Image (cartoon, helix red, strand yellow):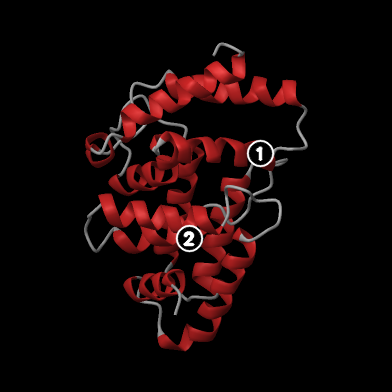
Amino acid sequence: MSALRHRWEQTLYTADVTARCATSADRVYQDILSAYGEQHRRYHGVEHLRSCFNVLDRYFTFSPEVQPAVEMALWFHDFRYDTQAADNEEQSALYAKEVLQERLELSEAFAQDVHDLILATKHRPPTSVVGLSLAKQIVSDVDLSILGAQPDVFDVYERQIRKEYSWVPEDAFREGRTRIIREFLDLRNIFYSDALHDAGYEDRAYANLQRSLRTLTGHQ
């Protein structure tokens, strides 16, 4: 059994998916792999999914009550990924909610929790963490962890993002990407968790983004 398949089985177990849903659960897993394996994905693919779980396991420990929803949200957070759409997170969240209730027979409350966690990956941070649940902080940090990766890994990510948006003319891409990076650099903190701060992710993220901004704006 592959590590990713084993992780899916673990997630099902922690979420208390019953044995009678085994066939449906297997099909859902195949649907997830098919979605993340779409040809146009260069960064938001299966490796991104693996990386999310690696970061989660390495840096985060949290209560058993939170874990199932966090893990399930990560599985589905990029299920819909169309670079010409503006509602990928919403569509992924709605799909997850439907699947969890109808195919995995989980409660409406749990499905709604997962739905809301996926929306946290829109990364529209509040002015403070007040009111932002621990689970949302974790999902957001895990999804953005690539920003604080080692410089060579971050540079690969940047090239992959450009390929995903290959249909966008260069000038328009630079303008849009510059705006996004400046929004991150204007944040007081990119990551919520002490764990990623302590591991150097915050400092590396700012350094990576500043370097990327210089490249985009022609200031080497």
- Residue 197 % position (x, y): 26, 34
Characterize the local packing of mark 2: few (<14), some (14-19) or many (20 or more) Cα atoms within 10 angstroms. Answer: many
Q: Which residue is mark 1?
A: 86
Name the disc covering residue 75, or none. Answer: 2
Q: Amino acid at mark 2?
A: Trp
Question: Residue at 61% of width from left, 26% of height from top?
Answer: 177
Dot 2 falls on a residue whose secondary structure is helix
- Residue 76 % position (x, y): 52, 58
Dot 1 falls on a residue whose secondary structure is loop
In which quadrant will I find the C terminus?
top right
Question: Residue at 57% of width from left, 20% of height from top?
Answer: 215
Q: Amino acid at mark 1?
A: Ala
| Foreground: disc 2 or disc 1 | 2
Characterize the local packing of mark 1: few (<14), some (14-19) or many (20 or more) Cα atoms within 10 angstroms. Answer: few
Question: Residue at 44% of width from left, 41% of height from top?
Answer: 146
Residue 148 image-quadrant placement: top left
Nearest to the observer: residue 173 or residue 218:
218
Residue 112 in view, yes or no? no
Q: Is residue 103 above or below residue 86?
A: below
- Residue 35 % position (x, y): 63, 61
